[in-house]
Amino acid sequence: MRIAFVGLGNMGGPMAANLAKAGHHVSAYDMSKAAIERVVGSGAHAAASATAAAADAEVVVTMLPAGQHVREIYLAGEGLLKTVKPGTLCIDSSTIDVTTARDVYAAAKAARVDFLDAPVSGGVGGAAAGTLTFMVGGDTPAFDRAKPILEKMGKNIFHAGGAGNGQAAKICNNMLLAISMIGTCEAFVLAEKLGLDHETLFKISSTASGQCWSLTSYCPVPGPVPASPANRGYQPGFTAAMMLKDLKLAQAAAQTAGAATPLGAQATALYSMFDAAGAGARDFSGIIQLLRGQPQA
Ligand code: NAD
């Protein structure tokens, strides 16, 4: 299959490489020449622009930083929706706001182009290993077309419903994760003050009603879960800056939709403080340091 891939950064680069390794003809473009060269080394073909990459593609995949880049690439004067043939399948895997995802879907429909929002979780490790989780919003026939392609880059592929629902699923999940991580950290900090050791709290809570993924798979203190970032000085993993980005998207969506998310708002404030203290590049579970009053320790 002829696939155009636009946005070859930390995530897009290895995702495009996996499509090329699976035998697809991948036409790759990024504003960064170095990023293009990296994927050419994995079997992709360099394109001179996004429109050149997409000109005769059956499928277009985009992996860009934020909503404004997605609008620019698809909707601007010479944007992809003016370039691609009717019937082309466009998959945007960037994490962006729900409103932009729905606007681009509507413009694509008017151009008789299939558009899916398909954000991912699993991070750079998952992108390289081809084990990402895709949360997909859009029409069922388009999802059915996309699934075999997404399976070359990911392990779990979920259809979350209509346009924008992939982004909705991603920000709801990550807001829940941030809140549960902060709660888990608070429990350990209180236990420290009360003289209850980490292992004992872990043993009890991991089999009691406080059990959650932040505790049992990604424990924010060293020891109980040897693979968690706490055991390697909070090297990411998933950075606090990325978590803050997703929390801000969740807050914007909550305001637009009129949903009350007071703990999401509090989590956003705490990750903003952690980021402002210079810890944005650390793993998000490192927020336990902020709760101890030592964000940089
Ligand atoms: P990145 O900054 O490493 O890559 C983005 C790439 O897009 C860059 O190479 C940049 O040059 C390119 N780009 C920007 N504007 C462009 C344009 N107009 N035309 C062509 N190329 C353009 O970011 P990333 O870490 O790869 O993340 C990409 C997306 O995936 C983001 O939306 C992010 O929120 C999401 N995401 C990232 C992670 C992660 O762990 N890094 C995890 C899940 C989701």
Image (spheres, rainbow, N blue to C red):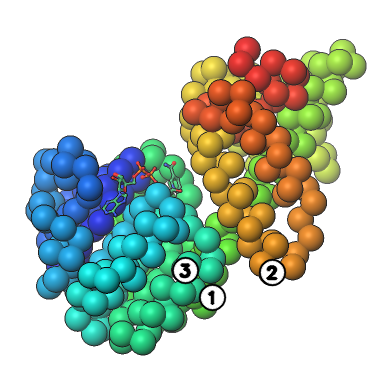
Q: How dense is the environment of label 3, judged by Cα within 10 Å: few (below 14), some, or many (20 and up)? A: many
Task: Say whether residue 22 is visible.
Answer: no
Q: How dense is the environment of label 1, judged by Cα within 10 Å: few (below 14), some, or many (20 and up)? A: some
Q: Amino acid at mark 1?
A: Gly
| Residue under the point 31% across and 86% down | 112
Q: Position of residue 16 (x, y in %)?
A: 24, 52
Q: Which residue is mark 1?
A: 161
Of 264 and 192, which appears nearest the observer? Answer: 264
Answer yes or no: do the residues labelled 2 and 1 have beta carbons within 8 Å? Answer: no
Q: Give me the disc on residue 101.
A: 3
Q: Give me the disc on residue 53.
A: none
Q: Amino acid at mark 3?
A: Ala
Name the quadrant of the C terminus: top right
Q: Quick check: 200 above or below 24?
A: above
**Mark 3 or mark 1: whose residue is earlier in sequence:** 3
Give me the C-alpha separation between circle 3 and circle 2: 15 Å
Circle 2: element type: helix
Q: In the figure, residue 172 lies in which quadrant?
A: bottom right
**Mark 2 or mark 1: whose residue is earlier in sequence:** 1
**Which residue is farthest front?**
77
Circle 3: element type: helix
Q: Which residue is mark 2?
A: 257
Q: Position of residue 25 (x, y in %)?
A: 12, 61
Give me the C-alpha separation between circle 3 and circle 1: 13 Å
Query: Does the beta carbon of the residue at mark 1 sit less than 8 Å from ligand 1?
Result: no
